[in-house]
Image (cartoon, rainbow, N blue to C red):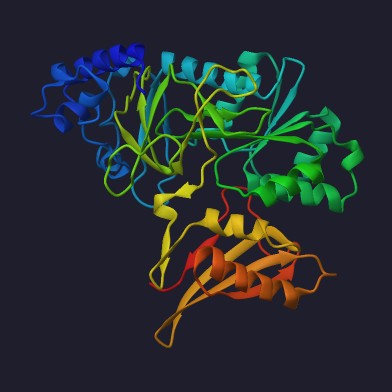
Amino acid sequence: MMKESQLEIIKKILLRLSLLDGFYKQKFEGIDLKSIQSQEDFQKLPFTDKSELRKAYPLGLQAVADSEIVRIHSSSGTTGTPVIIPYTQKDIADWAKMFKLCYETAGLTNLDRVHITPGYGLWTAGIGFQAGAELLGAMVIPMGPGNTDKQIQMMMDLKSTVLCATSSYALLLAEEIYKRKVKERIHLTKGIIGSERWGEKMRRRIANELGVQLFDIYGLTEIYGPGIAMSCPEECGMHYWDEYVYFEIIDQNTGELVPEGEMGELVITTLQKEGAPLIRYRTHDLTRFLPGDCACGLNYPRIDTILGRTDDMIKVRGVNIYPGQVDEMLREVEGASCEYQVMIDHLNGKDIVTLFFETENNVDKKGIEQNIRQHCKSRIGITVVPKAVSIGELPRSEKKATRIFDNRY
């Protein structure tokens, strides 16, 4: 439900955008923006999609004068033209404030030593983690990605207490620390993990091997970057900062709002952003609103952890498959690790799905493969060719891990 304060902010944003020669003046041409006086009116506005942002390259989204822009960030552009997002000084300050809220929600203080492994540069991750930690007053160790030897050495020597990483890199570090038998020299107590979907099995493994409490952080380049939502110690979804962002959850096919508690696609409207405000932006991330108050006492609304993305869906023999479904299925199979890869091939007129998953060497691999085959059929509705491999045999990534490879096209 939209708050009255959010509606008033949105009305002012729409009025300002209607007076600017730019992206939204063209997009909303023919719409009387002054007629938007309620949540129901707002829901009639068209969505904004990433394909439109790509067409605005390089600076078509800019909504203030050049003199007010102090920084740009960009999406990776791995699947097309990158999206360039310009930031004002206020945008940078607001982002740091949200990140500080994230850290405080996880219980960090100015006595913590924050070890940052996500990348710097045009990507929003590293510098966002750093700005929030500095505003909190914590010690920042801005490592960036890669060079695992140096990462572990600095962790030990500087006594890092908080690890910021993707789940893939956190797992790689955990495995390396275990192999090198240096866990007693590691002082980590918390891990703040973002950038990609990760299952409960991976969560437990990272937490156990590093000896840390884990927190989910959420964000995307188009909407500041990471830091717009954060899980709390209760581990029941993620709180989001609704004075900065307005969330809707829609049916991905119809565009209509789904009932509270039902899974759908997250749509975000920025409430404070100056450089590149976004109205009803379709994130393609799948989640749901969590009703009621959180036991942590934090007075912010919550969404569930991200199930996956609508554009991550793969259709095989008429069945829709999301990576999150594979995560959940593996969690139910004793002896199967959290690391997996799905290979989809088209052979002799048929789609063949091979599921590689890691197991310990001393387990009954044939028995686990049979269990996986049955679980995939009953839980996901598809027959797979399960292939058990040893722990560490599948590739690790310092960035986002690719789980599903579709080789049919």
* Residue 399 visible in this rendered orientation of the protein: yes
Q: Whole-percent x and y of residue 233?
A: 68, 28
Q: Nearer the viewer, residue 178 or 280?
A: 280
**For this view, does 24 lie left or right of residue 383?**
left
Q: Whole-percent x and y of residue 301?
A: 49, 24
**For this view, does 50 lie left or right of residue 292?**
left
Residue at the (39%, 85%) spot, across then down: 349
Q: Which picture quadrant has residue 70? A: top left
Q: Nearer the viewer, residue 242 or 398?
A: 242
Image quadrant containing the N terminus? top left
Q: Nearer the viewer, residue 75 or 171?
A: 171
Q: Please say if 218 is above or below 331.
A: above
* Residue 127 visible in this rendered orientation of the protein: no
The number of numbered discs placed on residues in the rendered structure image is 0
Q: Nearer the viewer, residue 270 or 222?
A: 270
Q: Which picture quadrant has residue 271? A: top left
Q: Whole-percent x and y of residue 357?
A: 66, 66
Residue at the (74%, 62%) spot, across then down: 334
Q: Please say if 354 is above or below 260.
A: below
Q: Whole-percent x and y of residue 179?
A: 85, 53
**For this view, does 274 lie left or right of residue 56?**
right
Q: Which picture quadrant has residue 101? A: top right
Q: Residue furthest bottom?
A: 348
Image quadrant containing the C terminus? bottom left
Residue at the (62%, 50%) spot, across then down: 199
Q: Residue furthest left?
A: 30
Q: Please say if 167 is above or below 392.
A: above
